[in-house]
Image (spheres, rainbow, N blue to C red):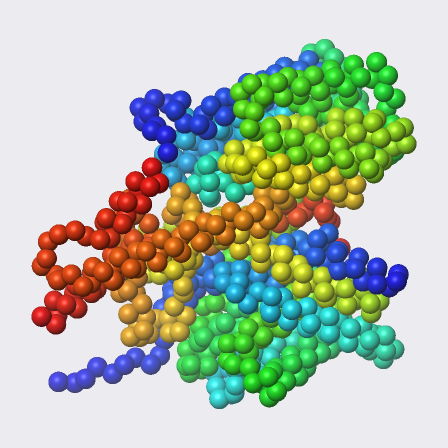
Amino acid sequence: MKKKTKRKHLKLSTALFKGGYIHNPLLTQLLGLCPIIMAAISVKNALCLSAVFALLLVVNEVIASIFLKNMSRWVRVSLYTVISAGILALVLSKINQEASAALGVYLPLLCVNAIIVVRCEKFAIRTNVLNSVYDAVANSIAFLVVAFLVGLIRQVLSTGSLFGLQTPFKNPGMAMPFAGLVVLGFLAAIHKWSVMNFYPDELVDTFSLKGAFEKPVLVDPGLNTKQERAHKKQFKEERQEFDRIRPRYSIEDVESSLEEKRAQKKKEEES
Amino acid sequence: MPQENKTAFFKTDDPLFSYSVDTLLMGLGLLIMGIYLNGIAALYHAAVGIVSAVICEYVSFKLVLKKNTLGNMSAFSVGLLIALSVSAACPLWITASASAFAVLVAKLPFGGTRNAPFVPVAAGVCFAQLCFPLYVFTYPAVSGGLHPVFNNAEGFVKGTSLIDLLESGKAVSLNIFNYTSLLSGKYPGAIGTTCMLAMLGIVLYQLIRRPKRLYASFGFLVCCGIFAAAFPRINTGRLSSVIMELSAGSLMFVALLVLNDPVTSPKRPLQSVLYGAVAGTLCMLLRYFGKINEPAFFSVLLVNAFWPILSRQTATDQKQSNEKRKRLKKAAKKDKKLSAGQKGKNTITEVLDDEKENEA
Amino acid sequence: MTQFISMLIAALYAMLLQNLVFSAAYGITESVKIAKRPKYLVMCAFSVGVFSAATAVICRLLDNVKFVAGLSTAVHFLIYAGVLVMLYLIGGGFCVAVLKADKKFMNSLGMCALNSLVLAVPLLNASANYTIIESVGTGIGAALAFLLAVLLINAGIRHIAGNESIPKVFRGTPALLIYVSLLSLAFSCFTGESLFL
């Protein structure tokens, strides 16, 4: 019988689904928030930021995937900044004054965006060029969607107008950083609700026993590696146990009762 | 945890219910004076604030938490206090949006009033003050009588509040007529923050009903008084500086009704006094050097943010949870030594039951 | 003495009056990451301060050179980024060769040196036209702002982690984002509606 060969290439749909939607870098991992909070105050700004970010991410991931695999990590991270700074210098010289003034210092600061470093280090250097491109596209689309939604909501609420249409409500404070964080918080909640309801098996962590935040699987999204499967299985057990005894007991009780169960299982296997 | 009556709408056994009712009663006194001084607009603001807070809480908590939390009356008290903190001349939708912000941002994501890390009233008022400073800080001249005084209405006359006088270095000469004006609230200001007589009534009410809640207010007011005496902004004497600073703006209102929120403020007397003192220091520093016209509500938010770092409560909780974890691990190890089929005592259950008895 | 006072004022401005993390969202990702596990907070804040101050000083010195001052904004930015990367490589090389630093330390150093907070400091100094002493003050202020932000966010994380009443959809990152938004609202009282950038 023919042996099934392990799939080496990531599908674009899988990258978009897992990398862009389930493990959205902004809404689940809180990466690269600075430009969204401060600069995404209108749709135009959001689109401009997203376009530049996409360019930086794709170029960095491709270069990391091809040339930087064998370099020591502490030197490699500085190269991402250098590459991004070079690209941004070209972009800044071509971009018009109005867009540059609207984005202020947040456009140049994209060169030290955490998403670029994290995606290159966690993914691009461990895989081939095509997978890196797919991953970069997925993360860029995730950035675009979040930036667009934040920019749209803030533009409508702060200026009271959208594409020439006037709205009755106008709140200039929506251009302030706290408003950006509030909008991001509610978008993160909506994202979590959608994942919990439509893809509950994909939810990595609703309430981690080690802490209160997601521990995203960033190594090989979509390739269904042994590590990812083990992590999912472990989390499923923990979550089921937590739901079972949660009304009466606390996190420590869950850990200890799980230890107890595993010890009993081992004994049964030995006997 | 008190046993709640699940069938009744109003959760009368809930401590939060009695606190909210007390706040509503105190706020009602301020509202009556506000209506006398500012006209029917004060009533409209109160109605809009309460309705907005109640609707937002009902809809959002039903959708997200799948339960009705209106029974503890906290939404009503939040709406009323926010309405009392804004100018009578500002548009009604500002009061509505501030109430909505307080409920949807400061309460809902943290599971309700009992677990909110920041005082919802302070968050709502700060939102309004930051986003619409022109509307919120434009006070109508106090002329008495019942008439609408919205900002763009014909015949609207802008008043100069005590805060404006302090900032410009102008003193109010404190003779019997001005003391009367201060006590009766005849200086322009927010709806429920100007009448010092009503504030004294609130102090008496709290002394009778909830004396422990006054520790934080005491710390706050003493600290503000010391600042005002030590660094007067007017040159008519330290006493008049203290009286003016304490009467100006929303300082007394915040001290008596907002700062001593039972959820966020400490429980022990000394800690409460320190908490109030820190808030008072921040308030006076912001008044002297900040850009916001009335920073008392911001000082409440800042002290809510800084207090977990300044107090040692967080460290104690962490230590207790670490000790509990160690005990449970020890118990789990003991259980491993028992054979699988052996019936008998389960050490983990015993430890947990013991803990529950100790806690009770 | 006046120069020392102006340095302190610049530091106070960056730390409190216009807290670079809450009022301008610089370094907010790194602040949240360190706040989850603040074991090496002091070391990280120190690194941020050293890199910010050093970058700020070198960039201001370069700005005073006539040739550099006449260059376009894009090239200016390239120079600032280049200075930061050079400082990081020198610092990193020193740590690896002399101090024999391990992988974990070097990973943290990368995060502390190459972030938006550190790179924003020379850009802010240039726009506000600060002197060299004031630039050092801004660098120190950036480190203090980072330290303060991490402490405050860590307090929030502890509150959120211990709160079982939080609705499921808000548990974790959504509640944390809203907590940080309320912190930002509280710090907005210092700046009012406007920021200096």
Question: Who is closer to the viewer here, A254 or C33?
Answer: A254
User: Which quadrant does the N terminus of chain C fall into?
Assistant: bottom right
Residue at 26% from the left image edge and 44% from the top image edge: B353
x, y percent for residue C90: 66, 84
- Whether residue A262 is visible, yes or no, is yes
x, y percent for residue B265: 55, 37
Residue at 48% from the left image edge and 73% from the top image edge: A119
Q: Is residue B299 left or right of residue B233?
A: left
x, y percent for residue A183: 54, 49
Q: Reply above or below: B53 against C116.
A: above
User: Which quadrant does the C terminus of chain C fall into?
Assistant: bottom right
Residue at 28% from the left image edge and 70% from the top image edge: A230
Q: Reply above or below: B169 against B154.
A: below
x, y percent for residue B198: 66, 17
- Whether residue B132 is visible, yes or no, is no
Q: Is residue C152 left or right of residue B345?
A: right
Question: Who is closer to the viewer here, B231 or A232?
Answer: B231
